[in-house]
Image (tube, helix red, strand yellow):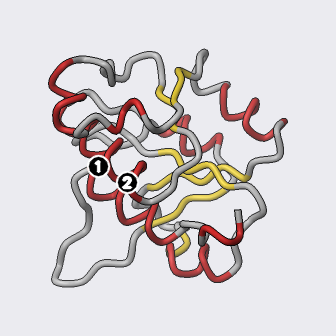
Amino acid sequence: MRIVTLHNIGAAMRACAALGVDVVLFTPSCADPLYRRAVRVSMGTVFQVPWTRIDPWPSGIQTLREHGFTVGALALEEDSISLDDLVADPPEKLALVLGTEGDGLKPRTIAGCDMTVRIPMSGGVDSLNVASAVAVAAWATRVPDGDR
């Protein structure tokens, strides 16, 4: 993730903890999840979910692939597949990449991923706040506790 707003870091980490995300990888330019505001918004869950920085970026995408991950970029692209379609036929190991507030992911990051995924929406809304997108994607792709 590349999130720069501390509130969003905290909210995303709280969602990741609640929904069983295995690990969170932050890019070098992401805000510090241990900053007091992020810790407070996360209600302390930044200490529950394993996390680290993945550097360098975006070449870290290749490192994920080398470890058996299919890498999906959450982005609004013409060729994006629906999150519903991804969940219907999930890869064995999945890493989702989310971008910064406002600008989203850079084109070179999207191009480096195996697929582009979009969250289906209605009401004329085309995107969500990044912390909300983390929560939706984590919920949709969660693995039931008995299957871990």
Q: Where does label 2 land, which residue?
A: 134
Picture residue at 75% right of the left edge, 33% below the top? 62
| Marks 2,1: beta carbons within 8 A | yes
Residue 112, given in percent of the width and then of the height, sits at 65, 40
Residue 81, given in percent of the width and then of the height, sits at 55, 72
Amino acid type at circle 1 is Val
Residue 34, given in percent of the width and then of the height, sits at 31, 19
Spatial CA distance of label 2 from label 1 is: 6 Å
Picture residue at 24% right of the left edge, 83% below the top? 122
User: Which quadrant of the figure contains the C terminus?
Assistant: bottom right
Q: Against 74, is 86 above or below? A: below
Q: Is residue 24 left or right of residue 69?
A: left
Q: Is residue 96 left or right of residue 14?
A: right
Q: Secondary structure at mark 2?
A: helix
Residue 143, given in percent of the width and then of the height, sits at 61, 67
Q: Nearer the viewer, residue 127 or 142?
A: 142
Q: Against 7, is 36 above or below? A: above
Amino acid type at circle 2 is Val
Q: For residue 148, which numbered disc appears in the image?
A: none
Q: Nearer the viewer, residue 59 or 95?
A: 95
Q: Where does label 1 land, which residue?
A: 130
Q: Dot 2, how many residues are within 10 Å of its Cα: few (below 14), some (14-19), or many (20+)?
A: many
Q: Is residue 27 left or right of residue 36?
A: right
Q: Against 18, is 54 above or below? A: above
User: Which quadrant of the figure contains the N terminus?
Assistant: top left
Q: Secondary structure at mark 1?
A: helix
Q: Quadrant of residue 41?
A: top left
Q: Against 105, is 127 above or below? A: below
Q: Quadrant of residue 42?
A: top left
Q: Dot 1, how many residues are within 10 Å of its Cα: few (below 14), some (14-19), or many (20+)?
A: many
